[in-house]
Each structure stands twice: as structure tokens, then as C-alpha cells.
Image (tube, helix red, strand yellow):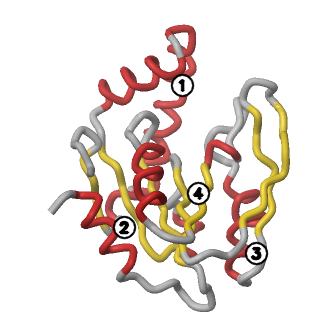
Amino acid sequence: MPILRELIDLIEGSEPPPPLSTRIIAIDGLGGAGKTTLAGLVSGALSDCAVIHTDDFASWENNLDWWPRLREQVLGPLMANEVARYQRYDWLRRELAEWIEVKPADYVVLEGVASSRAQFQEALAVSIWVETPRDERLRRGLARDGEAMRDYWFQWMRDEDRYFEAERPDLRADMIVDGLLTWS
């Protein structure tokens, strides 16, 4: 069975934690693992699904401690079955940009580094970890962001390593996906 089909079966068979009516699915992994690609495939296979990127909350100055804003502006309202509203971070302008609304849906995919952190567990129906070797993640990141970003990538990887060691999100994942495989 293709991995995407297994994921969709897992997600569709899940229940939202009370009192949610929305099933929130975390797709976590370290930078360059393939989380955004997988989130696009998952959301495309589900009906009534929104996607929220943790990169909309992180910033140049704060790449891992952004979670209180996501919890307050997104998870809090969704847990109350209300519309979530958050301001997206613009990485090019280095400032908060437009406001985005997320209505309670059947599914919300929360995609990005630290999307399954301990502080979000009560809201998650499913947690997926994307495991990809470090050298491949760096290769992908530099291919996407450019060689000029190499020093940032090394800093981000060090920060992400600290998150991984402190939280071990792979150990609480409902499914671990190999980021080197073809998923569909």
C-alpha cells in the first residue's frame, strides 16, 4: 500500500480530541525533511482541509520559540470550535504581514518544524514525523533557499537538533515516514 494511502487511512480513522470537531494533524520533521511536500499531498487527498505552516510563525530572530502565538491565535480558537486568525510572518520583508483566517474544518494540517511539540499535544488527532538524513535535508534546503543561506541553515539545524533532543517528537508520532521515499 502506498504510504500516502496509509497516512490518509490513519487520519480518516482518527478522532479529534474533545472538545474539538476538527482533526488537527501535525506533520513534523527537521528542516528540509519534506514536510511541506507531504502536507500538500495529504491536504489534497482530504476533503475540507486547511494547511497552516509553522514558518508563518517563526522568524529570523525566533525560529523555535514562536509557539505561544500559534497556540493562542490558532489552536485556542480551533479548540473552541471558532475561527482562528493569525498574522503570517513575511520572511523577505522581515515583518508580520497579512492576517489569515482558518475556519474550523474537518481537517487542519499543521505543518513544519516543531508542529508536534509537547505544548500542542492536547489538540492533535494525529502526529506524523518525517525522517530524512541530515545531508539530504541540507541539500534540499540550499537548493530551495540558495547557497547564500548556508550559514543560516547551519544555525537552524543546530537549533532544530536542540528541539529534537529535548522533545523527541519521533517517539510520540503515530507514524514515521521516510523522507527519501516516494509517497504517492
Residue 179: image location, x then y, percent: 29, 42
Taking depth in this image into account, of 34 and 153 the one nearest to the observer is 34
Q: Is residue 122 visible?
A: no
Identify the residue shown where x is 46% and y is 52%.
39
Check the image and report above or below for 22 versus 31.
Answer: below
Taking depth in this image into account, of 173 and 44 the one nearest to the observer is 44
Determine the image quadrant of residue 107: bottom right
Tell me, for residue 77, which label it has, or none: 3
Taking depth in this image into account, of 130 and 117 the one nearest to the observer is 130
Tell me, for residue 51, which label it has, or none: 4
Badge 4, how many Cα within 10 Å: few under 14, some, many 20+?
A: some
Residue of label 1: 155
**Dot placed on the residue nearer the N-terminal end, 2 or 3:** 3
Secondary structure category for the residue under label 1: helix
Residue of label 2: 172
**Dot placed on the residue nearer the N-terminal end, 4 or 1:** 4
Q: Is residue 152 left or right of residue 92?
A: left
Dots 2, 4 in contact, CB < 8 A: no
**Dot placed on the residue nearer the N-terminal end, 2 or 4:** 4
Closer to the eye: label 1 or 3: 3
Check the image and report above or below for 184 versus 7.
Answer: above
Q: Measure the alpha-carbon separation of dots 2 and 4.
A: 21 Å
Residue 21: image location, x then y, percent: 60, 86
